[in-house]
């Protein structure tokens, strides 16, 4: 279903999840993401580069991002490709395992 979508919009508010898996899944599919600044989403998305971040409850901002993506399919691709690259880099099991091992070794 993600491959058939124009974008993923996650408009949560409050503290939210630390790192919403849905966001990474959509990004891995090459979808631009429009997401509220919740939890760790600012660490996951570089606004305007591989997705869009909006303030919580910013209905006008969400609508503006979606309008841009619908009106400009090239923009969706220009955001979607880096989104995919970001997601694939973040969910690489080998790289993440090595990074974790390095951190553990540094604490000893």
Image (cartoon, rainbow, N blue to C red):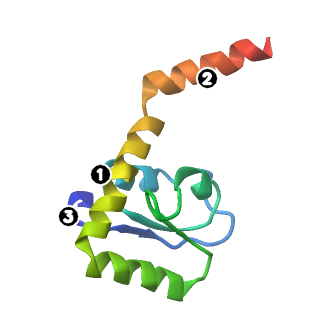
Q: Which mark is residue 100?
A: 2
**Earlier sequence position, callout 3 versus callout 2:** 3
Q: Please identify the quarter of the rendering in which residue 79 is found.
A: bottom left
Q: Which residue is mark 1?
A: 29
How far apart, in angstroms, are the residues tagged by discs 1 and 2? 25 Å
Find residue 14 and report its horizontal and vertical position in percent.
67, 70
**Earlier sequence position, callout 1 versus callout 3:** 3
The residue located at (52%, 63%) in the rendering is 47
How far apart, in angstroms, are the residues tagged by discs 1 and 3? 10 Å
Q: Which class describes the residues within 10 Å of circle 3: few (<14), some (14-19), or many (20+)? A: few
71 in relation to 13, above or below: below
List the single residue furthest toward the right.
108
Q: Which mark is residue 8?
A: none
* Quarter containing the C terminus: top right
> Along the horizontal axis of the image, is 53 left or right of 16?
left
The residue located at (36%, 79%) in the rendering is 68
Q: Please identify the quarter of the rendering in which residue 41 is found.
A: bottom right
Q: Secondary structure at mark 1?
A: loop
Q: Which class describes the residues within 10 Å of circle 2: few (<14), some (14-19), or many (20+)? A: few
Find residue 51 and report its horizontal and vertical position in percent.
45, 62
Q: Which residue is mark 3?
A: 4
How far apart, in angstroms, are the residues tagged by discs 3 and 2? 35 Å
List the single residue furthest toward the bottom.
60
Q: Secondary structure at mark 2?
A: helix
Q: Secondary structure at mark 3?
A: helix
């Amino acid at each position: 279903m993600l491959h058939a979508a124009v974008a993923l919009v996650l408009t949560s508010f409050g503290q939210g999840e630390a790192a919403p898996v849905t966001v990474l899944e959509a990004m891995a599919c090459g979808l631009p993401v429009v997401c509220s600044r919740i939890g760790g989403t600012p660490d996951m998305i570089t606004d305007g580069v591989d997705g869009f971040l909006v303030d919580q409850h910013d209905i006008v901002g969400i609508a503006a991002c979606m309008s841009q993506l619908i009106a400009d399919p090239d923009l969706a691709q220009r955001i979607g490709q880096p989104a995919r690259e970001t997601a694939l880099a973040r969910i690489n099991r080998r790289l993440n395992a090595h990074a974790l091992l390095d951190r553990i070794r540094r604490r000893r």
